[in-house]
Amino acid sequence: MAINKLERQVLEMIGEDANSPDVFTDDASGIEQIRQSLADGIAETVGLVGGWVETFSVPLVVDQTFYRIELLDADIGWFSDVWNVDTQTRLNQASLITLNSWDPLWMRYTGPPTQYVPIGTNTIAICPKASSSSGILELHIAAIPHVYKTGTDRIKLKRTYERAVVDYAVGEYWASRGAAAEATAHMSRFAEALGLQRTDRGNTGRIYSFDRVKESPDDIRISP
Amino acid sequence: MKYAEASRWIRRFLRDPAGNIWSDDLIRATFNQVQDELQSYCGLLVEVRAMPVPPRSDWAYLFEWENAYLPAGALRTQALRNQGNYWAYCSNFEVQTAFVSNSTDDPNDIGTATTQPWEAWIATPQEPPTWQLPDDYHEMKMAYYDERPIFATTRKDVNRNDPGYKQREGEPQAWYMRDEVTRQLTVYPKPSTTVWADETGSGMVTSVEDDTESSEIGAVTRIEGRYTSSSLGITVDVIAATDQMLFVYEVVPREIQSEDDELVWPATMMRYVCYRVVSRLYGMNSDGRIPTLAAFWEERYQLGLRVLKSWVANRRRDRLPIFSTHKKSIGRRKRMPRLPDKYPATYP
């Protein structure tokens, strides 16, 4: 069984022989923890920066406003574009509040859809609804991939972030070994690569509290 | 995605695969607590559900053969006990038999008892009919009746403006709830007309095609599966709204009771729940207490929250910003009914 280059990097960074691993052996169950960590890192990165957009064609159904959509091998991140194929026009994103404000009867209109509303994690509403079951909606979905299955599966990640994801997996490896300091160091690198590092680095564990200055009831002091 | 997968992940990072320190019950309880916290914080899980408006019968009878003995010209009749596959409840215990699926459910739950279709929505005597919202209801975002928005109000306001609200009929304008626990929703005024979208049988309503009922969602009917396509790696369900009550609401994540339970979270977000569970468990006063690891996983959870914030912002990325001057009001000006400008005719 082949391992991919990210898995190889992780094995090398945790002191395994990548050609003949001792603990994380070269089979589906042996490499599972590393693969899971890498997949989580990829999902988190893609969920943050986008980068992997899938296009799906959804047939319109007569008189239906709400469509619940499930991707089979990914989670829906967000809709980056929605197109009406028949009219070759782009749908504008709106919200339920906007549409209610525009016209409370918006849900009763039929015609070529011109607006859409994403709801929750997997539902989309269109306005106006289709007058017949004939049109096609083209959804461009920024997708967040599920765990890849084999070492030869495509890594759905921009190359710039590959090293960050390796750090993510190495950090989780150290955490699974109980080494919090090493885990924190690697996770910090991951966070820095994604622009998530906090400015109050090193304050982990500090407990903030408020107390009032008795002399002046309006003054509130924060400590430390 | 099943809870078993999350449980396995948590045990791996607790380094307690055999459960020598943390029991399954404790992990599950912590998981339930944390997923509630995460949903309260970010409100990402939103559900859209349609519930039919049940028809109201002028005459109800128990057996079909009684139909022949109804008064001449009786309209809107229904046999409560038919030869089909649905039930008519006359006593509370019957509901327990039908809906309680295992012995762990609370036997003191009085459930539902109906003799009229209206009452299937758990009516209280002398009160307008109510809709039982699903178990996972948390907070209403928007409610529609027959594809028109209806707005939140309180029973107090309704009563103040219309002392006869219990008898008032018409197209619903507003909704209110008596409390958050029973999750019984009432619309004002009560609908004067109802439509079964797709009924089978003749002379009486026996069942509605494509609707499913379960103990989880009580008497609420979920409509789905009208159109499904598994091509191109995507599954699409539509949610019918015509002639229905339609609710868009934030959900409270389903309580996990066993390893086989399905998680409501997308796989990506489930990790954030796990991070905080591990942090909590490492921080507990047990043999496995390790404050440094608790702090690490808490920090990891906080990092996840920042990712979720970005994710929420990304979802609105496709929205077109509209610039305007500060004097322009946002949205439509409220339109009030008014007479034409030249009415009534006046002399200068």
Image (cartoon, helix red, strand yellow):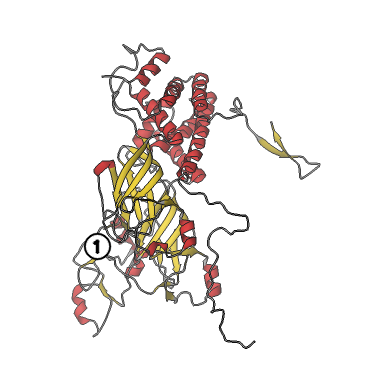
Q: How many neighbours does mark 1 have within 10 angstroms: few (below 14), some (14-19), or many (20 or more)?
A: few
Can you tell which quarter of the image residue B347 is in? bottom right
Q: Position of residue B304 (x, y in %)?
A: 49, 34
Q: Is residue A6 above or below residue A20?
A: below
Which residue is under mark 1?
A: B86
Q: Position of residue B128 (x, y in %)?
A: 43, 71
Element under label 1? Answer: loop
Q: Is residue B168 above or below residue B1?
A: below
| Left or right side of A214 for B268 | left
Q: Is residue B103 visible?
A: no
Q: Nearer the viewer, residue B99 or A120?
A: A120
How many numbered discs sit on the rendered protein? 1
Residue depicted at x 45% and y 24%: A164
Q: Nearer the viewer, residue A103 or B250?
A: A103
**Mark 1: amino acid:** Tyr
Q: Is residue A9 above or below residue B198?
A: above
Q: Nearer the viewer, residue B90 or A114?
A: A114
Label 1 is found on which chain of the structure? B
Residue depicted at x 42% and y 75%: B169
Can you tell which quarter of the image residue B32 is in? top left
Residue depicted at x 26% and y 82%: B74
Can you tell which quarter of the image residue B6 is in? top left
Tell which residue pokes out farthest to the right in this image: A215
Q: Position of residue B137 (x, y in %)?
A: 43, 53
User: The N terminus of chain A lies in which quarter of the figure?
Assistant: top left
User: The C terminus of chain A lies in which quarter of the figure?
Assistant: top right
| Left or right side of A182 for B83 | left
Q: Is residue A82 visible?
A: yes
Q: Position of residue A35 (x, y in %)?
A: 35, 25
Q: Is residue B71 above or below residue B300?
A: below
Residue depicted at x 32% and y 11%: A19
